[in-house]
Amino acid sequence: MAEQNYQQKKIDMESDAELSKELKRKKRMKLIAYFAAFAIFQTIVILVFSLTVMRIKNPKFRVRSVTVDDLTFTSTPNSPSFKMSFNAEVGVKNTNFGHFKFENTTISFDYRGIQVGEAFVAKGRAKARSTKKMTVIVELNSNNIIPANSNLGSDISSGFLTLTSHSKLNGKVHLTKIIKKKKAAQMDCTMTINLESGAIQDINCK
Ligand SMILES: *[C@@H]1O[C@H](CO)[C@@H](O)[C@H](O)[C@H]1NC(C)=O
């Protein structure tokens, strides 16, 4: 009785061995499939990450709005001139996944390529994926313009003056404590002063 049991057991064990070999093969195939899927998944994650989070772009620096406080002008033929002061709201738009820390800078306001005023922008930071707004006070005057060589008289007579503003904001985008990248935000805006209404209109920035 005991001998018979033993024989039976032996046969069972042999077929068990066959079965487990097959199972092992299946298991191995499954493992390879999992590994391949994982590798593909990792590649996609890295690709998406490097195309979004790790891709650091230059922030944008713009004049958002202007409130005129004071404006005087004259179009007398021999000495046309203007003088104005205004508050400008400027914005640093940072689309990166890390904050942008920037240095002090100045914004130059020009009339037909000649500087007529300047504004100081103190260093600061624009948070990740947000726009930092700041107000700057600007004083403009036409003292640098030689009336005889300019269109100032006719521009003032037309009732509109076109100004441009230029600036460069140097700084660094901080993705993490270690990953930082130097970036600069360039300002290049055009705006029109409506002398009659005393307002600045049509602010366009590149
Ligand atoms: C930035 O401007 C502040 C004044 O607001 C000044 O104290 C500081 O020295 C300036 N920093 C640099 C690096 O020029």
Image (tube, helix red, strand yellow):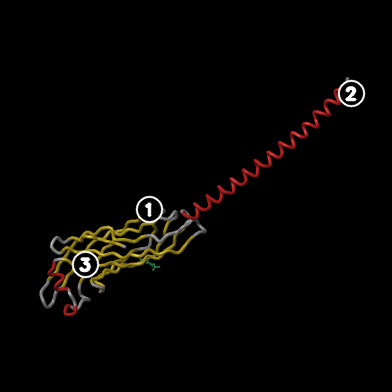
The image quarter containing residue 157 is bottom left
Q: Where is residue 126 in the image (x, y as percent from the top left)?
A: 39, 57
Circle 3 crowding by C-alpha within 10 Å: few under 14, some 14–19, many from 20:
some
Q: Which residue lies furthest to the bottom in this view?
A: 148
Q: Is residue 201 left or right of residue 103?
A: left
Q: Mark 2 or mark 1, which is nearer the start of the sequence?
A: 2
Q: Are marks 2 and 3 in contact (CB under 8 Å)?
A: no
Task: Name the residue that disc number 3 marks.
Answer: 162
Query: Gap between marks 1 and 2, in whole Å?
Result: 83 Å
Q: What element carries label 2?
A: helix
- Which of 107/7 is in front? 7
The image quarter containing residue 147 is bottom left
Q: Is residue 136 left or right of residue 79?
A: right
Task: Name the residue that disc number 1 marks.
Answer: 130
Q: What residue type is labelled 3?
A: Thr
Q: Which amino acid does label 2 sit on?
A: Glu
For residue 9, above or below residue 116? above
Q: Say which residue appears at 72% left-offset and 37% top-offset.
A: 22
Q: What residue type is labelled 1?
A: Ser
The image quarter containing residue 91 is bottom left
For residue 133, above or below residue 150? above
Quarter of the rendered structure image containing ligand 1: bottom left
Q: What element carries label 3?
A: strand
Circle 1 crowding by C-alpha within 10 Å: few under 14, some 14–19, many from 20:
some
Query: Gap between marks 2 and 3, in whole Å?
Result: 110 Å
Q: In this view, does 119 lie to the left or right of 125?
A: left
Q: Could you say which disc has been placed on residue 3 in the image?
A: 2
Q: Mark 3 or mark 2, which is nearer the start of the sequence?
A: 2
Q: Say which residue appears at 35% left-offset and 56% top-offset.
A: 132
Q: Say which residue appears at 40% left-offset and 53% top-offset.
A: 129
Q: Position of residue 174 (x, y in %)?
A: 46, 58
